[in-house]
Amino acid sequence: MDLPEAAPPVYAATAPLDLVGLDREALAAFFADLGETPYRVKQLWHWIYYQGATRFPAMTTFNKALREKLAESCRVSRPDVHQLQVSADGTQKWLLGFADGGEAETVHIPEKDRGTLCISSQIGCTLNCRFCHTGTQRLVRNLTPAEIVGQMLIARDHFSEWPSPKEARRISNVVFMGMGEPLYNYENVAAAIRILTDGDGIALSKRRVTLSTAGVVPMIARAGHELDVNLAISLHATTDDVRDEIVPLNRKYPIAELLAACRAYPRAANSRRITFEYVMLKGVNDSLVDARRLVKLIEGIPAKVNLIPFNPWPGAPYACASREAIRAFADVVNRAGYASPVRVARGQDILAACGQLKSESQRLPKTPAAVRERNSGDA
Ligand code: SAH
């Protein structure tokens, strides 16, 4: 009986070096070590981030010897998909698993002719905002550039959005509004943004990337100068007393300092709007006095105010403001000349809406068999 030919070395899942998440300088050094020219970087970038390739045999602009060498010593990683949930409104939430067993969530919010990917920057979060579910999670660590970019790659794979389309359809915008505080993981988030916006690959426009922060003041200026992406501020209160309580980071960087950083943000100086997020909590921050104070606080800043009806989660200590209170609040902000859309909650049925993300890494069964079993249960 004829035996089939031995398969060529393909994808070595256990090979050490992950090529995803490395910047161009690191890749150049890597290829130099292999005795290859710097031009290889451009070619590899094209395969990974333009074509979406994960297997070296497919990288046909490399000669066979190089393809084999890469296959032996490298990989092009993807996070594992531990769970994918789809909401009645089309919103999807991935629970992604990383090499150390940690998990984080990524949400896709489809709209007509476009869609937003809501990316996590950390597993868990250290900020403990009192209304946010993520803050109740025990395990916290920074995500690596590969793990941050990997969220985009997984979503692109899912929608078969390769090669990178000129006019992005399903994933046109990225917001760092998932789990974690991106400015507490600045270096890795910056590295990931540079990869996502690199014109030779995924080529997301900087105008379509939004960094959301609870107000890590010293890092705001740095992000503005180095990354030049849109800024969103999770403001949520108009007095330091209330903000100290619901966003404890305020005790370190109070409202006046935060707004001064916003006024100095380079994009704002160019009349690009900063988004202020404001979660509407019944009896806490939803009065007309608050609304008037808010417009005074942000006076002179090109801004838009996103009013977010509070999304409940099990055990949350707050309730959502009434529909009337939200409307009246929005009117005051609007009359002062600021767009004040009330955010429609998306994906609530799968706990994918703002502030509802919480992976359960600490209770995750670690063995591959247990994970498989869990996944089959979800199907
Ligand atoms: N740490 C960053 C990134 C997280 S963004 C930041 O704070 O901006 C997540 C957004 O959802 C923030 O504006 C957050 O304040 C808001 N949010 C958190 N919990 C919420 C809840 N239960 N209902 C509505 N919005 C919530």
Image: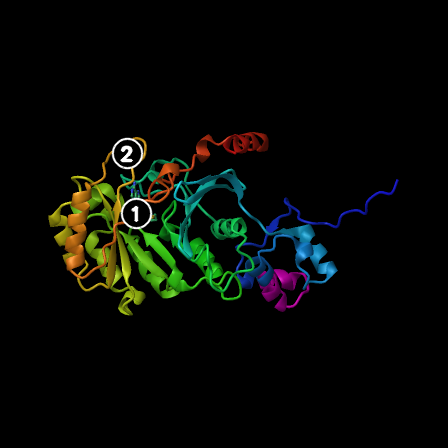
Q: Residue 238: tell me if it is visible.
A: no
Q: Is residue 227 magenta?
A: no
Q: Is mark 2 within 8 Å of ligand 1?
A: yes
* 251 left or right of 127 in image: left
Residue 207 visible from this viewpoint:
yes
The type of residue carrying mark 2 is Ala
Expressed as whole percent of the image width and height from the top left, the position of residue 176 reads 38, 52
x, y percent for residue 375: 53, 33
Task: Say which residue appears at 43% left-offset and 58% top-offset.
Answer: 172
At horizontal 17% and vertical 41% (from top left) the residue drawn is 284
Using a 10 Å C-alpha cutoff, classify the residue at mark 2 as few (fewer than 14 neighbours), some (14 to 19) or many (20 or more): few
Residue at 72% from the left image edge and 62% from the top image edge: 63
- Looking at the rendered structure, the kind of residue marked 1 is Val
Disc marking residue 157: none
Q: Which residue is mark 1?
A: 344
Q: Identify the residue shown where x is 45% and y is 42%.
A: 104
* Residue 208 percent location from the top left of the image: 39, 60
In the image: residue 149, left or right of residue 214? right
Q: 149 left or right of 130?
A: right
Classify residue 56 by image quadrant: bottom right
Residue 316's label in the rendered image is: 2
Q: Is residue 146 left or right of residue 116?
A: right
Structural crowding at the residue carrying mark 1, measured as other residues with C-alpha within 10 Å and reported as few (<14), some (14–19) or many (≥20) = few
The secondary structure that dominates the magenta segment is helix
Q: How many marks?
A: 2
Quadrant, the N terminus: top right
**The residue stretch that appears in magenta:** 27-45
Helix, strand or loop for disc 1: loop
Q: Farthest residue toward the left?
A: 289
Q: For mark 2, give the secondary structure.
A: loop
Q: Nearer the viewer, residue 246 or 8?
A: 8
